[in-house]
Amino acid sequence: MLLEREDLAVTAHRRGTPGFRRITLALFAAGLATFTTLYGVQSLLPALTGEFEISPATASLAVSLGTAGLAVGIIPLTALSAVWGRTRMMTASLFAAAVLCLAQAFSPSFTALLVLRGAQGLVLAGLTATAMSYLAEEIDRGSLGFAIGLYVAGNSIGGMAGRLIASLVLDVSNWRWALGVVGVLALGCAVLYRALILPSAYFRPAPARLREMAGTVGRSVTDPGLLRLFGCGLLLMGCFVTVYNYLSFRLLAAPFRLSHVIVGLISVVYLAGAVSSALAGRMADAFGRPRMLWASALVTLAGVLLMAASNLAAIVAGLVVTTVGFFAAHSTASSWVGARAATLGVQGPAIYLCCYYVGSSLGGWLGGFAYGGAGWGGVTGYIGALVVGVLLLALGLRSVAPATPRIPRA
C-alpha cells in the first residue's frame, strides 16, 4: 500500500537534519549550473554585437532564446517528470545543458548560436520545472520557505558567476573561450549535484494524463490569486533581465568606459540577491507573503530609480538595491504559488515559471528597443513601469481570498 505524503510528514526532511543539508546543497549546485549557463552570455552581448555587426536588441536574442526554450519546455517536462522521476529528470537536464554550453563555443554563426541557446533552455526546463516540486515533496512544510530561498540563492550566485567568469575570460581571450569555461563549470556542478542528491521518498510515478494536466492548467488560470502571482513573475523578470542585458553597454561606453573585467566584477552584487532570497523565505514564513511581496517590489523600484543617476557609485548602489528587491520578491512569489497551487491541486508552479521566463525572453528583448531609442533613460521608464505593475498586482493580492483546500476524490 502506497502512503501519501501527509501520512509521512513526520519523517520529511527538516532544517538542520543531514538530509535537508544534502538536498539543499545539491539543489544549490543545480541552480548554480542552470543560471551560470543561462545568463553567462549576458556579459558577452557587447562582444557579439561587435563580431556579428548586430544591434544590442538582436544580440539580446542570445539570452531571450534560452529563456524562451525554458518557457516552452516547463509545462510538458513537468508532466514528464511525473512519469520519469524527479531526480532522473534533473540529472539529465544538467548534463545535457553543460554539453550544449560547450558546443556553443564552436558556433559557426550567430544563427547557430541561437539554435543551441534555444536547445539549452529547453533541456534546462527539466531542472527548473522539477526542482520546486521535488522540494515540496521532500522538505517539511515548516522548512520549505527556507529551502526554496536557498535554491533561489543558488540561482542568484549562478547568474553572478556566469557573468563574472565570462567577463574575466573575455578580457584575455574571446567569447568562445568564455562559453567554454562556463560549460566546464556547469559540468562540475552537475557532477556535484548527482553525488549529493537524495532519491525521492515521496514521489510516486504516474502515467501522463494530458486531459487531466490540461484541466489543472485551466483551473490555475481561473484562480485570481495565482493569476496575479503569474503576472508578478513575468513583470519582475522582464525588469531584471533588461537591467543586466543592457547595463554593460552603458558602462562600456562614454562617459564611464569601464573594462570588461570591471563590468564583470560589478556582477558580484548578485551575492546580495543570494542573501535576500534566503532571508525573504524566512521572513515570508514569519510575517506573511503579502507584506514581503509588496515591500520587495518597493525596494526594487527604489533601486531602478537610483540607477538613473549619472554617478557610477549611485548606479552600483542602485544595482545592489534592485537585485536585493528582485530576488526577495521572486522568492516570495514562487513559494506563494507553490503553497496556493498545492492547496488547489493545480499546475501553478509550472505556469509561474513559464510566465517568469516569458518575461525574461520577451521583456528583455523589448528592453533593447527602449535602450536603442532613448538610452538608459528609456530603460528606466520601461523597467519602472514594469515594477509599478508588480506593485499594483501585489496590492490586489491582499484582497484575494485564501485558496480553498481541494477535497480529494473518494
Image (cartoon, rainbow, N blue to C red):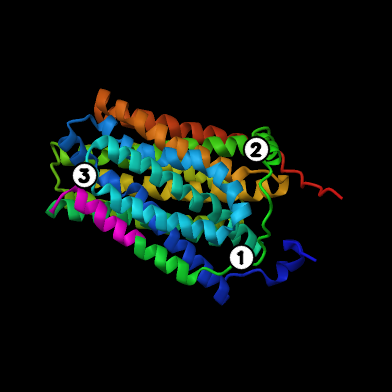
Q: Amino acid at mark 3?
A: Leu
Relative to the observer, which residue lies in front, 280 or 309? Answer: 280
> x, y (%) of residue 207?
68, 50
Q: Residue at coordinates 20% horizontally, 53% vertically from top-left?
A: 177
Residue that label 2 marks: 217
Residue that label 1 marks: 200
Q: Are marks 2 and 3 in contact (CB under 8 Å)?
A: no
Mark 2 vs 3, N-terminal side: 2
> x, y (%) of residue 308?
29, 35
Inspect the magenta stretch and tell me whether residue 182 lies in it.
Answer: yes
Q: Residue at coordinates 59% horizontally, 46% vertically from top-left?
A: 349
Residue at mark 2 to residue at mark 3: CA–CA distance: 45 Å
Relative to the observer, which residue lies in front, 14 or 301? Answer: 14
Residue at mark 1 to residue at mark 3: CA–CA distance: 48 Å
Q: Residue at coordinates 72% horizontally, 70% vertically from top-left?
A: 10
Residue that label 3 marks: 312
Residue 42: quarter of image: top left
Q: Amino acid at mark 2?
A: Val
